[in-house]
Image: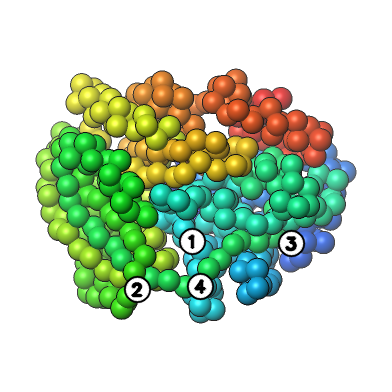
Amino acid sequence: MGSTASGKSGTWRNWGGNVTVRPAREVTPASVDELAAAVRQAAEDGLKVKAVGSGHSFTSIAATDGVSIRPQLLTGIRNIDRQAMTVTVESGTPLKRLNMALAREGLSLTNMGDIMEQTVSGATSTGTHGTGRESASLAAQIKALELVTADGSVLTCSEKDNPEVFAAARVGLGALGIVTAITFAVEPLFLLAAREEPMPLDRVLAEFDQLRTENEHFEFYWFPHTGNTNTKRNNRSAGPAQPVSQLAGWFEDEFLSNGVFHAAQLLGRAAPAVVPTIARISSTALSARSYTDIPYKVFTSPRRVRFVEMEYAVPREALVDTLRELRAMVERSGLRVNFPVEVRTAPADDIALSTASARDSAYVAVHMFRGTPYQAYFTAAERIFTAHEGRPHWGKVHTRDAEYFAEVYPRFGEFTALRDRLDPDRLFQNDYLRRVLGQ
């Protein structure tokens, strides 16, 4: 898979191309026992250990110069419990395969993000989410998990077993152990009616609360240098299914969103002065469309254009101010931003380091085409986000450290205390965790 991009001679590169590392050795365990043995062996050899999924994080959260554990053999569904309505999957299972397998069984996750390349453990460990009025992130849909801890033992946790580990490990950043299996809540397969529609930014901001409360899943994309957005509303439907026709689907998702979009990115990177013109053309080229399909076909879309991304969760009531400040900053700055800004929401959850922990949240994501200088834009955006006590996505570019997180996460100390207990010798440490969790 393109996302598990590894280069020559044991060099590992992430999907965004902004992190490169050379581990001392790579292990691809075929069972939980083999994984536990690899963890014990690493400890004996004095090497740090990290599991790496599809490399979809833009931070160096999975990077190590020690032992890199690849989960591609730990995949597939272990068990479906139709009484409890749960599914237990091996940690290396890509979301794409989970979604397709569940659909064949007449089941679905309640909510998901818009990319399906990640492994289930990579996506949940970094707090990956979609948008939802009542339904929260992938990690919030976890009912139990199994992890190999630093001493090589296998620990199962849920609301009943090891509840304090469960409260933290659902978004564990790879700091508490290596997740080997996840049990998700599922429900009978349902249909979503999607309505995509261009709308002026001023109207979206004025009506944001209404749009959010009237729809189960609301999100929008704002095109910088313009007053235009594209909105997307997903709501459950009794049917019948009316998928996007293959030609229209190919045209919208492949040609427009990936093909033409890629060409526009290349042009904008070569000639930044034309970016505002491209933004105006591309944001007005979108037309409204409606379709009804099973959830993963509505929630997710292919991402072939490589980019680098920063995303912050701000308190939901701060969203409108945050976006107005972002727009003013882009207009003042002379920056040329060729990628739409994505806005989503999530209800508060009860996971210690979830970006929505104990607060209703709105997510604002800024992107830049891979290879375009992004520092000036991201730095200016981050200044706005942090002024609103924003919490960065753990797998996306940010400059925050443990001191900052201790202020914006009420349960930060609870997480670090648990880490002291489960990994006292910091077997799962790397530079990123040293920065975000402290020594």
- Using residue 4 as the reference point, say whether residue 168 is left or right of it: right
Give the spatial CA distance, label 2 vs label 3: 44 Å
- Residue at 75%, 35% in the rendered image: 419
Label 3: how many residues lie within 10 Å, few (<14), some (14-19) or many (20+)?
Answer: some
Foreground mark, 2 or 3, reads 2
Q: Earlier in the sequence, mark 1 or mark 3?
A: 3
Label 1: element kind: loop
Q: Earlier in the sequence, mark 4 or mark 3?
A: 3
Q: Quarter of the image containing the C terminus? A: top right
Residue 47 makes an appearance in the image: yes
Residue type indicated by callout 4: Pro
Percent position of residue 339, x then y? 28, 42
Foreground mark, 1 or 3, reads 1
Q: Which residue is mark 4?
A: 188
The tally of labels here is: 4
Give the spatial CA distance, label 4 vs label 2: 13 Å
Label 3: element kind: loop
Residue type indicated by callout 3: Pro
- Residue at 51%, 50% in the rendered image: 137
Q: Which residue is mark 3?
A: 29
Q: Which residue is mark 1?
A: 110
Label 1: how many residues lie within 10 Å, few (<14), some (14-19) or many (20+)?
Answer: many
Label 2: how many residues lie within 10 Å, few (<14), some (14-19) or many (20+)?
Answer: few
Residue type indicated by callout 2: Ala
